[in-house]
Amino acid sequence: MPINLTVVFKSKPEHIEDVRAMLLNLVEKSREEKACLQYDLHHGTKNPEIFIFHEIWESQEGLDLHDQQPYIKKLVAEIPALIQEPAAIYHTELLNL
C-alpha cells in the first residue's frame, strides 16, 4: 500500500533562499529512489516562508530506506537552524479515488 506524506517547513524569514535551495536539492535525489512514486515541492505564494512536500512512497520499507539516505540525514542535521519550528509531517490517505 502506498505511503502518502505531506511535510510542511516554515523557514525563518532571513533563510528563505537557503531553505529553498536545501529542499530543492532533495527533489532530484529522492525521485531517483526506487520506492519513490511522487516527490513534489510547493512554495507558499502568499506566505513565502512556507514550503510543502507532497510525497508518495511505494511502501513503508521504501520510506524507511529514504529516511536513511545521507542527504536526508544531512537535512535533519542542518535545517533546524533555518526553520521557525519543527517540520509538520502528515501521513494521509487519498480519498478521491
Image (spheres, helix red, strand yellow):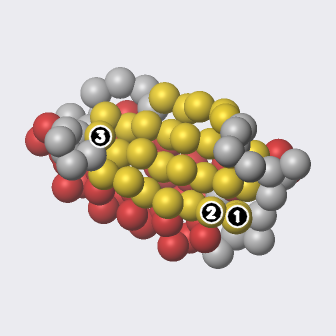
What residue is at 64 percent from the left and 75 percent from the top?
A: 32
Kind of residue at disc 2: Gln
Quote the CA–CA distance across marks 1 and 2: 6 Å
Quote the CA–CA distance across marks 2 and 3: 20 Å
Residue nearest the viewer, comparing 95 with 29: 95
Quote the CA–CA distance across marks 3 and 1: 23 Å
Q: Is residue 62 visible?
A: no
Look at mark 1 in the image and give the residue it sits on.
36
Look at mark 2 in the image and give the residue it sits on.
38
Say if mark 3 contacts mark 1, CB within 8 Å.
no
What residue is at 61 percent from the left and 70 percent from the top?
A: 31
Say if mark 1 contacts mark 2, CB within 8 Å.
yes
Image coordinates for residue 94, horizontal then vertical, percent = 69, 43
Image coordinates for residue 12, horizontal then vertical, percent = 20, 35
Look at mark 3 in the image and give the residue it sits on.
50
Return the residue found at the far left.
14
Examine the rendered structure and indicate whether residue 52 appears above or below residue 30: above
Q: Taking 42 as reference, is 65 left or right? A: right
Rate crowding at label 2 as few (under 14), some (14 to 19) or many (20 or more) other CA atoms within 10 Å: some
Kind of residue at disc 1: Cys
Examine the rendered structure and indicate whether residue 32 appears above or below residue 70: below
Image coordinates for residue 10, horizontal then vertical, percent = 31, 34
Q: Taking 33 as reference, is 45 left or right? A: left
Q: Nearer the viewer, mark 1 or mark 2?
A: 2
For mark 1, give the secondary structure: strand
- Tell me which numbered mark, 3 or 1, is placed earlier along the sequence: 1
For mark 3, give the secondary structure: strand
